[in-house]
Image: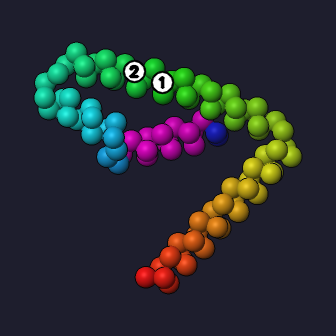
Amino acid sequence: MMNAIGIFTGFYGYLFPGNINLMVLQLYQSKQKKQLYFILFLIVLFESIYLYISITLLNTIEHHDKLLTYLHLVSNMLLLIMGLWMIMDDFGK
């Protein structure tokens, strides 16, 4: 299940323009094929390393119930704080 969530989140993250996406687009438009292939290779390499580390850590965390419970609690608290911050920011304008 964690793998499916990670794949969906990773795909969703690439839909919106960002620095990497815009850089790749500019390299493609300027017809710099060697640099484009090199950058794409680096992206795939580092994303693969990041994915391996993330999945390994998630599998480790999944087996520790207390740690997983604390992480859920902390993430829910952070979401609540960010939501309240956004509401307070809207009232301030």
Q: Nearer the viewer, residue 2 or 90?
A: 90
Location of residue 82 by image quarter: bottom right
Q: Is residue 30 magenta?
A: no
Q: Quadrant of residue 62?
A: top right
Label 1 secondary element: helix
Q: In x, y percent, where is residue 87?
A: 54, 77
Q: Is residue 78 above or below residue 6?
A: below
Please tell me how crowded label 2 is: few (under 14), some (14-19), or many (20+) other residues with Cα within 10 Å. Answer: few
Q: Which mark is residue 37?
A: none
Q: Residues within 10 Å of mark 1 (few under 14, many from 20)?
A: few
Residue at (60, 35) in percent of width and height: 3
Look at the numbered discs 1 and 2 and tell me whether their residues touch, using CB distance below 8 Å. yes
Q: Whole-percent x and y of residue 68? A: 78, 46
Q: Which residue is pictured at 32% across the width and 23% down the height?
A: 39
Q: Which residues are magenta?
A: 3-15
Q: Which residue is mark 1?
A: 46
User: Label 2: which residue?
Assistant: 42
Under mark 2, the amino acid is Leu
Residue visible at 57% across and 71% down in the picture: 85
Count of numbered marks: 2
Distance (Cα) linking label 1 and label 2: 6 Å
**Which residue is painted at 27% across and 32% down in the image?**
24
The three-letter amino acid code for the residue at tag 1 is Phe
Position of 59 with respect to 37 (left or right) is: right
Quarter the C terminus occupies? bottom left
